[in-house]
Amino acid sequence: MKRIAFLTTLNLFAFLAQGQETIAEKDSFYNLSPVEVKAVRAAEHAPVTKTNISKKEIEKQNLAQDLPFLLNQTPSVVINADAGNGVGYTGIRIRGTDATRINVTLNGIPYNDAESQGTFFVDLPDFASSVNSIQIQRGVGTSSNGAGAFGATINFSTNEANLKPYSEFNNSYGSFATWKNTIKAGTGLIGHHFTVDARLSNITSSGFIDRASSKLRSLYFSTGYIGKSNSLRFNLFKGYEKTYQAWYGVSEADLKAGNRRINYAGTEKPGEPYDNETDNYWQDHYQLFYTHHFNERLAFNTALFFTKGKGYYEEYRAGQTYSSYNLPSPVLGGNVMDTADFIRQLWLNNNFYGNIFSLQYHDASTEITFGGAYTRYEGNHYGKLIWATYGLTGPDKWYDLNALKTDFNSYAKLLQEFSKRWNAYADLQYRHVRYNIDGFPDNRDLFIKNNYDFFNPKIGVSYAHNGWSGYFSYGIAQKEPNRDDFEAGKNQQPKPERLHDIELGFERRGRNYRWGATFYYMKYRDQLVLTGKINDVGAYTRTNIPDSYRMGVELQGSLQPVSW
């Protein structure tokens, strides 16, 4: 797999309307994490294995590739891309666990798909251009909103207020005809209270893998009111992607034969591969935040959100039976035609909405947080036949299935400083999940109605003195299976997973250097592991195993011999 090699980056700064001057220092924003982000992030002295990424670090790598590629240099991260160059569908693993076990939040709001529990960053093209900071927590981490963290937690923050006006136009060009065009601007603080920020982005690429093209567009808009005790912010971001399918990988035989760029998608069509074997998806996010500071020590935050997603993938399927689509076999010239070639679309239309909230208290030695979230997911899965060799007079819907999932969690966190050197941490979370599935495309009579109750405690201590720091923590996380895990059949229903996580970390900081080591032991009960089988969209199927573990050591260090 070849990484994209960008050749040029052009930055053009223009004046804002009304004659406001361009600001070279684009990091002129409130450098304090918004309340809704602090609720799910680990504080500096919390005994949690974490990595913080600043806006300046993000900008250094933000060219056109997807968000996982920006995190590639952090500990225990392994990434992949369907197209082979980081544009389009990408994946991330942390400590060997895939994205379905990595809890992702956007400003504290859950981003993982409620059913698959995956994170499809392709639906957020160029989102990094609007991100102010990122925190990665490895292991169980702190309590968060959404599915449990079985490998890591990643939370993105965009809500820091830009205090000074700015405008920016960026173009990036790289190998495999990759283009990224971004225009963004902000008003800065107007009348000491109001801010407006906006961005438009367009990304196109031919991909390293044959025909693995990408056409991506996104919009970001944010406006806020900042008062002495109250603040209000509204975010709207939209993403659209059209990518040629490349999720089947490359076989060992083709790799050995030198066919590294081969793409099997669309090749069921006789002759040339089907030219519209594409994935198409639209996703809109609406977020409304309200924060009230009772005094310097006590603050309350709540947010309402709504995420709308709709899209399909289209594919050419050869030699399919009419009965598999609940269609009668046509009769041509007295002959019954049992099979034909079909072009089909598999659709997903979903609504995801809810509320997050937190109450935070802090003084010189104590930080207390109470918080939680309620979310509801409504998914409609349906398939459409749009063409057949013969016998199809118009689009035909061969399945139409619904799913409903609700998720409630509440948590309490305490970080207590006992001396200038020692801190203790405790974190308790309760989570209730209800999941109903009204059948599957290939198993219409399989209905799922499950309820799960999880209690996830975490404790730890940390120490810091004279440039040395260390911590020890123990945490439990539990999570429900995803949609694909249920499709095996009534007699093979999956169990929820449970994780016991032990972390021990040390760090040394000097004037111009730092190094650290983390030892972890992650003990699983009923972990869902891959079986080697692949379903019809290239996803691997999983089964529970009673006992398993991951353990390892993470080493990192940096040296800055000069200050510039």
Image (cartoon, rainbow, N blue to C red):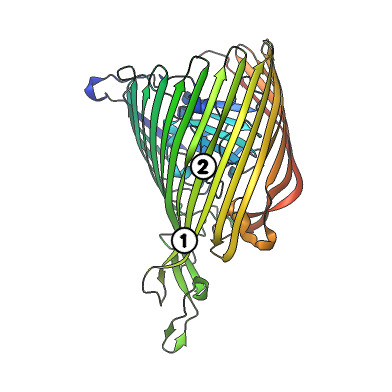
Q: Looking at this rendering, what residue extends furthest in the right direction?
A: 547
Numbered label attached to residue 421: none
Density class for disc 1 (Cα within 10 Å; few <14, some 14-19, many ≥20) is some
Q: x%, y% of residue 319?
A: 51, 73
Q: Dot 1 lies on which element?
A: strand
Pick whichever of labels 1 and 2 is earlier in the sequence. 2
40 up-or-down from 336: above or below: above
Q: x%, y% of residue 302?
A: 47, 30
Residue positioned 46% across, 87% down in the render: 335
Taking 474 as reference, is 188 left or right? left
Residue 475: which quarter of the image?
Answer: top right
Q: Which residue is mark 2?
A: 375
Which amino acid type is marked by label 1?
Tyr
Which amino acid type is marked by label 2?
Thr
Residue nearest the viewer, comparing 174 with 312? 312
Residue positioned 60% across, 57% down in the render: 448
Residue nearest the viewer, comparing 39 with 93? 39
Q: Looking at this rendering, what residue extends furthest in the bottom direction?
A: 334
Q: x%, y% of residue 380?
A: 47, 56
Residue 30: which quarter of the image?
Answer: top left
Q: Nearer the viewer, mark 1 or mark 2?
A: 2
279 up-or-down from 307: above or below: below
Q: x%, y% of residue 298?
A: 52, 18
Taking 202 as reference, is 511 left or right? right
